[in-house]
Image (cartoon, rainbow, N blue to C red):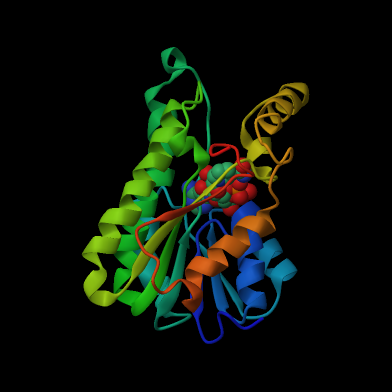
Amino acid sequence: MNRLQNKTALITGGNSGIGFATAKEFLEQGATVIITGRNQASLDEAKQALQGKVFTILSNSSNLNDVRALRKQVEEISPALDIVFINAGIGKFAPIEAVTEEHYDEQFNVNVKGAYFTIQQLLPLINDGGSIILNTSVNAHMGMANSSVYSATKAALLTLARTLSAELLHRRIRVNAISPGPVTTPIFDKLGMAADEKEGLKTAVQSKVPLGRFGDPAEIARVATFFASDDSTFVLGTEIIADGGMITL
Ligand SMILES: NC(=O)c1ccc[n+]([C@@H]2O[C@H](COP(=O)([O-])OP(=O)(O)OC[C@H]3O[C@@H](n4cnc5c(N)ncnc54)[C@H](OP(=O)(O)O)[C@@H]3O)[C@@H](O)[C@H]2O)c1
């Protein structure tokens, strides 16, 4: 239970779902954890639930002013970071004919622009030999109707794992991605669907998972711990697909 002893991690969108489960796991593994989120009440609730060496920063990943302020806010808590988990993200689904500029910009702003500039701004704080982990999605690998914008945002992150690993070789900073399949988190409550519509979607998605179930956020958190820890010091520019066999079987 000490795979992350003496390491400091920052997790974007750490107040909920996979980010929250990863914060819990990182704390259990001995890390100091900073979680960001866009809602102070949710951050306070998460901090209360997590306990231990956990700090919060109110920061909206889609707002570049917030992203630019992040480095200074982190420095007030810790002089350096060992692990950055780029996890904050949103998903919206619509056929291409119905996609608006707002639908497109909203997702690219959080999932890609926010992710990219968060890494850029935090880089000076990341220790040599550090680990950056990107939360992508199996959607980056699938032709799933109505997911064109969301899938494109996640595919963009996958290329970042490779290009940034190459750019950061001189500092031995490894950039890797996790591509989860369906995982039980509040993200499904944020789709703006009626309850029966949401249940229908869940049943349809679950039927496509060979293991026959959604993943648990803790199962993704353990993958993140692998990338965050010294167990993966020879692993860079790649991804782990954690999807119950959805796209590989
Ligand atoms: N659950 C799945 O099936 C699944 C599958 C594949 C990939 N993923 C990816 O996993 C990541 C985490 O999602 P999740 O399933 O754990 O959903 P979640 O519970 O909704 O968590 C998403 C987190 O990101 C935060 N966030 C969203 N927009 C933000 C912004 N502009 N600034 C700061 N924080 C923001 C959310 O804050 P709020 O609480 O304020 O909304 C929340 O903390 C996402 O990138 C998602 O695309 C999820």
- Residue at horizontal 44 percent and vertical 80 percent from the top: 76
- Residue positioned most to the bottom: 6
Question: Extreme front residue here?
Answer: 249
Which quadrant holds residue 238?
bottom left
Q: Which residue occupies 32% across, 48% down?
A: 159
Nearest the camera: 125 or 41? Answer: 125
**165 up-or-down from 215: above or below:** below
Q: Image quadrant of residue 219?
A: bottom right
In the rendered view, tell whether residue 94 sits above or below residue 80: above
Give the image location of residue 181, x and y in percent. Answer: 59, 42
Q: Relative to residue 141, is residue 200 drawn left or right?
A: right
Percent coordinates x, y for residue 78 in the rendering: 45, 82
Q: How many marks?
A: 0
Locate the N terminus and report the quarter of the image it occupies.
bottom right
Residue 170 visible in image: yes
Picture residue at 42% right of the left edge, 42% below the top: 154
Give the percent coordinates (x, y) of residue 7. 50, 81
Spot occupied by residue 212 in the image (x, y as percentages of width and height)? 74, 37
Q: Residue at x 50, y 22 (%)?
A: 146
Q: Quadrant of the C terminus?
A: top right
In the depicted structure, whether residue 11 falls above or below residue 98: below
Residue 15 visible in this rendered orientation of the protein:
no
Q: In the figure, residue 16 lies in which quadrant?
A: bottom right
- Left or right of 196? Residue 76 is left
